[in-house]
Image (cartoon, rainbow, N blue to C red):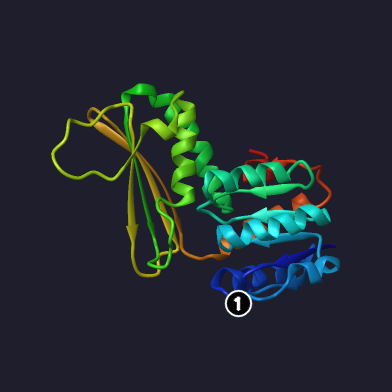
Amino acid sequence: MTRIAISGANGRMGQTLIEAVKLNSSIEVGCVLDIGDHLKDMLNSFDVLIDFTRPEATLEYLSICQKAGKGMVIGTTGFSDEGLVQIEKATSDIAIVFAPNMSVGVNLTLKLLDTAAKVFGEDADIEIIETHHRHKVDAPSGTALKMGEVVANALGRDLSTCAVYGREGIEEPRKRQTIGFSTIRGGDVVGDHTVSFFMEGERVEITHKASSRMTFANGAVRAAHWLSGKQSKLYSMQDVLGL
């Protein structure tokens, strides 16, 4: 039986994760943490920590788990480049599943995007639109950026140089080599993502819409159970799902 620690337990995602664990007979909640709780005092209570908090908190938990040899499932987004390096370095000591989106549907969508980008090649203008609730603080979302990365890699592009984040004013016409991002924030939208491939005379849109946080929670729980016993390495949800 895999024992799970859940951080941010009093938040919306934390509560959903607790519910998801209770519905899975292969794992159990070993401990929960909220602001002010000390992970160091709970190390004997869990095997894998699931974390969907904020980058600064995640990196603090990461340091503790690395020293204690505890696996992590990280769904937090908005890391700086330095934070990403810290996560990768930690995998020399512990196994980590790190993904901007734990949804099974989103990860299948990433596979479809890779295929679509390779089929359309340089013939398409590509735009990514994402919508989230008013409380989301990072933009574009980690999922939108991952989608852009998948498409860029399939086309042999570097997302850091070809991404365009919003447009304003009178500028030169759109360049085919760019990948555009648009961000919408409002209400209680859990998460909508659409990638559009615009060709002459037609367009193809690949969309994923999440109506419940349970889809992320179920994916994270599945990842935590899969991670137990794995060798120290950085894994993605593609690894978990065998995609």
Which residue sits at x=17%, y=31%? 172
Which residue sits at x=66%, y=68%? 7
Which residue sits at x=64%, y=68%? 17
- Judge whether residue 221 can be spotted in this image: no
98 is higher (above) or lower (below) than 190: above
Question: Residue 113 at what x, y percent from top left?
Answer: 46, 36
Farthest residue in the front direction?
82
Which residue sits at x=69%, y=53%? 223
> Is residue 41 left or right of 104 when viewed as pictured?
right
Q: Residue type at mark 1?
A: Asn
The quarter in which the N terminus is drawn is: bottom right
218 is higher (above) or lower (below) than 90: below
Find residue 124 and report its image quarter.
Answer: top left
Question: Residue 165 at what x, y percent from top left?
Answer: 32, 43
Name the one closer to the observer, 178 or 241: 178
Question: Residue 89 at what x, y percent from top left?
Answer: 70, 42
The quarter in which the C terminus is drawn is: top right
- Judge whether residue 109 can be spotted in this image: yes
> Is residue 32 left or right of 139 when viewed as pictured?
right
**Badge 1: few (under 14), some or many (20 or more) residues near its Cα, within 10 Å?**
some
Question: Residue 123 at what x, y percent from top left?
Answer: 32, 23
Tag 1's secondary structure? loop
Find residue 37 and report its image quarter.
Answer: bottom right
Farthest residue in the left direction?
170
> Is residue 211 left or right of 50 when viewed as pictured?
left
108 is higher (above) or lower (below) than 125: below
Disc 1: which residue: 10
> Is residue 173 left or right of 220 when viewed as pictured?
left
